[in-house]
């Protein structure tokens, strides 16, 4: 059995019902919109985010979920999908999960409008049901994701990212949405409990580890998920590279920055940068930090009673670290 299926076992029924509710939450009177949202629903990914919502809710409550949990999972997925649709426009990307992106099939204007529509659908789903506590969690996540992206763009111009700024970027850009899923799962079943903040922190730690794992794929020998060296081509500052820049000689630093800024399309030069980062211990350092985030996340889970939901969350933490793409 695949790890993802194993993780999903205690919430199989909830995930099936969620898929129905999620499809319903996207419907519109406009035929074009329905065609596009139908296309989106049929090309879903692993659905890690709703899985976090349901597993955390069931662990915190001792095994039960409610309508708020389903709405929370739908809102997260609607807003996450909206950001993906917009991201593909921003990145001028024609593919998403191996299929054509919305902007590739229907052009940028329609893609931006579809993203806006999904965002408003998500917000209204909370407002119409009075889930203002859940709406706040999600709205903070959307704000932080936008700030993280813009901070990354601002810093990439100068390639002067410190490790602290890098953590702030990935916390906002990647970790904040996973944190929102976990916080929301807890809040849907135990609104005023300590678990809401505990689970937010748990999700944030997993999100940090998840992004560092993504950074490491860029240095893989095989193209896993994304082509090797693509972060360097796009002048994205990742943890292995930041560590190398901070620990190498001034001369080497100049060469690295020059390579990334002016020779990032040169395959040979990109390969030399990758080799040097490996040689300088950049990868080992990133793996060490990733494992520190993982240990902190597991420490938080250890405070909860043992259950199949907790076991699935432990599996999820390990899957984030061990995944191959």
Image (tube, grey):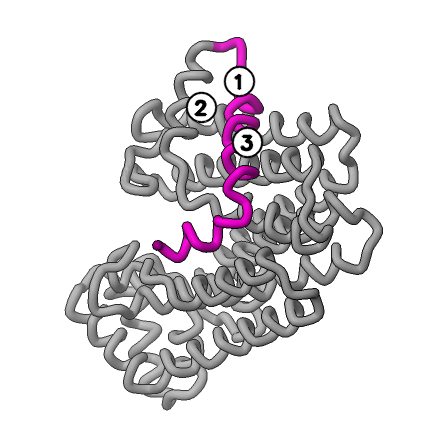
Q: Are marks 1 and 3 in contact (CB under 8 Å)?
A: no
Pointers 2 and 1 in contact (C-beta within 8 Å): yes
Left or right, 64 with respect to 89, comes to right
Measuring from the top left, give residue 302's x and y in whole percent. Answer: 65, 71
Res 134 quadrant in image? top right
Above or below residue 181? Residue 205 is below
204, 47: nearer the viewer: 47
> The residue tagged with tag 3: helix, strand or loop?
helix
- Which of the two labelled residues, at mark 2 and mark 1, occupies the earlier sequence position? 1
Say which residue appears at 44% left-offset and 41% top-offset.
87
Q: Which residue is mark 3?
A: 17
Can you give x and y, in whole percent of width and height, for residue 204 in the image? Answer: 61, 61
Residue 169 in view (yes/no): no
Please tell me which residue is depicted at 64% across the width and 65% down the height of the picture. Answer: 306
Q: Quadrant of the N terminus?
A: bottom left
Q: Nearer the viewer, residue 74 or 247?
A: 74
In this rendered view, identify the residue nearer to me: 23 or 54: 54
What residue is shown with label 1?
A: 27
């Amino acid at each position: 059995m695949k790890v993802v299926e194993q993780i999903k076992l205690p919430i199989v029924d909830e995930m099936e019902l969620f898929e129905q509710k999620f499809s319903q939450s996207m419907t519109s009177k406009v035929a074009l919109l329905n065609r596009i949202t139908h296309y989106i629903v049929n090309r879903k990914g692993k659905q890690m985010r709703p899985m976090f919502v349901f597993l955390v809710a069931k662990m915190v409550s001792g095994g039960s979920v409610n309508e708020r949990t389903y709405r929370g999972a739908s809102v997260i997925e609607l807003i996450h999908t909206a950001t993906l649709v917009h991201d593909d426009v921003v990145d001028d990307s024609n593919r998403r999960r191996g299929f054509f992106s919305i902007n590739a099939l229907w052009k940028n204007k329609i893609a931006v409008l579809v993203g806006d529509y999904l965002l408003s659908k998500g917000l209204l789903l909370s407002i119409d049901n009075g889930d203002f506590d859940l709406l706040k969690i999600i709205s903070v996540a959307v704000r932080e994701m936008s700030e993280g992206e813009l901070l990354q763009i601002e810093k990439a111009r100068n390639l002067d990212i410190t490790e602290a700024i890098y953590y702030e970027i990935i916390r906002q850009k990647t970790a904040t949405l996973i944190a929102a899923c976990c916080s929301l799962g807890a809040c849907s079943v135990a609104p005023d409990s300590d678990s809401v903040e505990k689970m937010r922190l748990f999700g944030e730690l997993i999100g940090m580890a998840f992004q560092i794992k993504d950074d490491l794929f860029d240095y893989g020998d095989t193209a896993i998920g994304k082509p090797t060296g693509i972060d360097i081509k796009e002048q994205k500052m990742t943890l292995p590279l930041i560590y190398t820049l901070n620990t190498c000689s001034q001369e080497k630093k100049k060469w690295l920055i020059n390579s990334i800024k002016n020779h990032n399309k040169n395959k040979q030069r990109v390969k030399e940068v990758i080799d040097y980062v490996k040689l300088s211990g950049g990868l080992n350092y990133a793996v060490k930090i990733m494992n520190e985030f993982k240990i902190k996340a597991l420490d938080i889970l250890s405070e909860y009673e043992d259950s199949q939901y907790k076991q699935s969350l432990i599996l999820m933490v390990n899957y984030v670290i061990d995944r191959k793409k």
